[in-house]
Image (cartoon, rainbow, N blue to C red):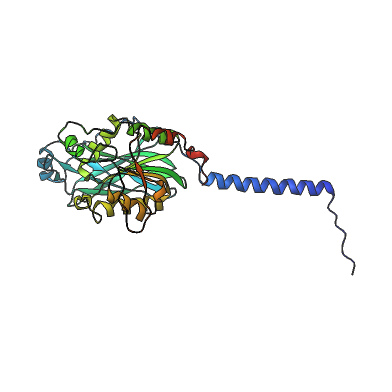
Amino acid sequence: MTRPTSTLTPSTLVALATLAAALVLAGGCQRERAAPRVPWPGEAPACAPPTASGAAWRHDRSAVVARMGEPRHVASDVVVPARTRPELVAKFAYGKVSKDLEGEDVDVYLAGADCAVRRLGRTGTDDDGRAGYQAPALPPGHHRYWMRVAGDGSAAEGGVWVLPGATPAVVFDIDGTLTIDDGELLDDLLGRGAEAFAGAAAVARAWADKGYLVVYVTGRPYPLRERTRRWLVTGGFPFGPLFTPDRLRDGRPSRDGVGAFKREALTALQAAGLRVVRAYGNAATDVCAYAEAGVPPAATFILGTPTPCDAHPLPHALAGYVDHLADVEAQPAAATLAP
């Protein structure tokens, strides 16, 4: 049986090869675009908050609660993968006793990098003073949101970081890691201001300048979330998501307290797409939390002498940040890391 003669000419073969190469390159570009790098803001964007709605209270008792003192509202920062609807959560309370605001309307607003504020909708507080709202899926990048009490216009502000894919990140504990010891929290509460380690802000900034997302995970209780944000800003630390326990008992200085909180927070963040390339801590609870969350001990730096955690290898001991800055400056930029 005679085989048919090919009618492909050399020029046709070259054209087909060129087309195949173009398709391969196009596929590569699509894969590249699937996880682009996002320029995370190093400072909190200066977006003007939404104006007050001026609505009436739903309950007369709420007006009494609002007169108990200044608002002590706190909103949670959120990190989600692309094409995911983020859950926005805030707690609303007033005065030194943090009296919860129950059963009141809360309006939800959002702003992107352009600071254009849009209203998403309305939700309400429960009997614990908490309110939640599921926002639509947002484009990769940082977004600010506000949850504003309709009755008096006071608001809680948080951030949403939408990850485009695997996102290189650096994690910092705060007390005893960025501050000179755990007791500095008391100084902060008394208005004296917590003292930071020399060079700590410069190290965090160096990571941010290289394109890494800087994340703060601390056992400070949630009522101190806004105070902690302000301390980071005034101390020159880069802007990034801040995570604190939502329950006071989760801040207990123990492995099943703050250790469990940090482990679960880091596990969730990595599931969302964070790739933790470096983690800083100071306590035995940090050593175990980082190791149990899958952060390699070789990528973990502990101020002082680290305590071993079970069978995990010991992390690096860190004497201080001033000399450590050279090591950070020698690290590759986030954009050069393989996805």
Q: Position of residue 181 (x, y in %)?
A: 23, 39
Picture residue at 26% right of the left edge, 41% below the top = 176
- Tell which of 290 and 43 is nearer to you: 290
Q: Is residue 58 visible?
A: yes
Q: Position of residue 71 (x, y in %)?
A: 17, 38
Q: Position of residue 271 (x, y in %)?
A: 40, 53
- Tell which of 265 and 6 is nearer to you: 265
Q: Position of residue 57 (x, y in %)?
A: 16, 42
Picture residue at 30% right of the left edge, 49% below the top = 286
Q: Quadrant of residue 2?
A: bottom right
Q: Quadrant of residue 241?
A: top left
Which quarter of the rendering shows the N terminus? Answer: bottom right
Where 222 sits versus 325, above or below?
Answer: below
Q: Quadrant of residue 237?
A: top left
Where 325 sits versus 79, above or below?
Answer: above
Left-right relation of 270 to 63? right
Picture residue at 57% right of the left edge, 46% below the top = 30
